[in-house]
């Protein structure tokens, strides 16, 4: 059971570089999410997606773009990385209904220097 | 505008005693509430959830209570064990046609002393 898989696990970028964080889930969930976690700040929602082809902004979307090309994959792109984007990024997918639960990936630790 | 708040950043409790974690929310339209546990360098793991139409849900050592009039929920862990030492997050889910928005609180760090 792979669940939610994020790649890469670690990344160091220079200011101004771009990169895409990948996320895939094999549970056939419709809803997927990207969060960032900073020390003492909890999990802040960047973007979320209700289904293939639909995305919506969360609390902290500035500086990010997302893509939901199919049900399985939800990617997060940093077009021009800034030191303020140094964080741990988590992807999640949601099972809603009688046993509502969100499943998380292991996280991507991103450092922008 | 922080819709989900955990006002206690940390909690210390003796092994075997009860841990009570609190969470407040501002939006009465939330449909579900969830609790997560997180160890360093790992993703959050699900503990328990509750529908907004219920006031209590229990699963083993974990019980969640929901007080809708006060917009408050709490997680009780009884008895607390050293392995429970972690950061705990509450989350609120709003189900909409446009998408299911899941919002987290800031977390409470729990330390269970042997």
Image: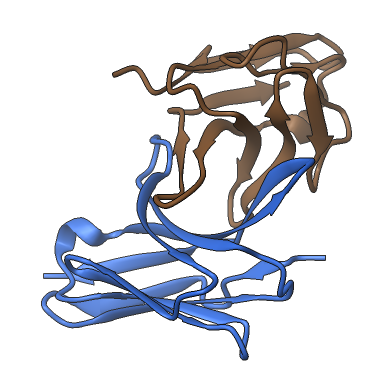
Chain colours: A brown, B blue
Residue A45 image point, x, y percent: 70, 44
Rendered image quadrant of residue A58:
top right
Above or below for B93 versus B113: above
Which of the two residues, B103 or B87, is positioned nearer the viewer here? B103
Tell me which residue sits at (65%, 67%) in the image: B4
**Image quarter hosting the N terminus of chain B:** bottom right
Tell me which residue sits at (70%, 11%) in the image: A20
Residue found at the far bottom of this picture: B69
Above or below for B9 versus B94: below
**Image quarter hosting the C terminus of chain B:** bottom left
Residue A89 image point, x, y percent: 60, 31
Tell me which residue sits at (80%, 9%) in the image: A18
Does residue B66 appear to the left or right of B2 in the view shown? left
Count of marks placed on residues = 0
Does residue A62 appear to the left or right of B99 in the view shown? right
Residue A69 image point, x, y percent: 72, 10
Residue B15 image point, x, y percent: 13, 74
Which of the two residues, A75 or B114, is positioned nearer the viewer here? A75
Does residue B71 appear to the left or right of B79 in the view shown? right
Above or below for A54 versus B32: above
């Amino acid at each position: 059971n792979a669940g939610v898989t994020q790649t890469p696990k670690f990344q160091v970028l220079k200011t101004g570089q771009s990169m895409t964080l990948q996320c895939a889930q094999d549970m056939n969930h419709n809803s997927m999410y990207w969060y960032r976690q900073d020390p003492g700040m909890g999990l802040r929602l960047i973007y979320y997606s209700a289904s293939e082809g639909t995305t919506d902004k969360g609390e902290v979307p500035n500086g990010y773009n997302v893509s939901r090309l199919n049900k399985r994959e939800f990617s997060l792109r940093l077009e021009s990385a800034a030191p303020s984007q140094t964080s741990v990024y988590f992807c999640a997918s949601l099972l809603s209904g009688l046993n509502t639960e969100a499943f998380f990936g292991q996280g991507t630790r991103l450092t922008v220097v | 505008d922080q819709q989900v708040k955990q006002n206690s950043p940390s909690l210390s409790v003796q092994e075997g005693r009860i841990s009570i974690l609190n969470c407040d929310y501002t939006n009465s339209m939330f449909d579900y509430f969830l609790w997560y546990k997180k160890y360093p360098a790992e993703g959050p793991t699900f503990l328990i959830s509750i529908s907004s139409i219920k006031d209590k849900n229990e699963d083993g050592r974990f019980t969640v209570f929901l007080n809708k009039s006060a917009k408050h929920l709490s997680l009780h862990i009884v008895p607390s064990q050293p392995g429970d030492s972690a950061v705990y997050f509450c989350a609120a889910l709003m189900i909409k046609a446009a998408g299911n928005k899941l919002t987290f609180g800031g977390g409470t760090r729990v330390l269970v002393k042997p």
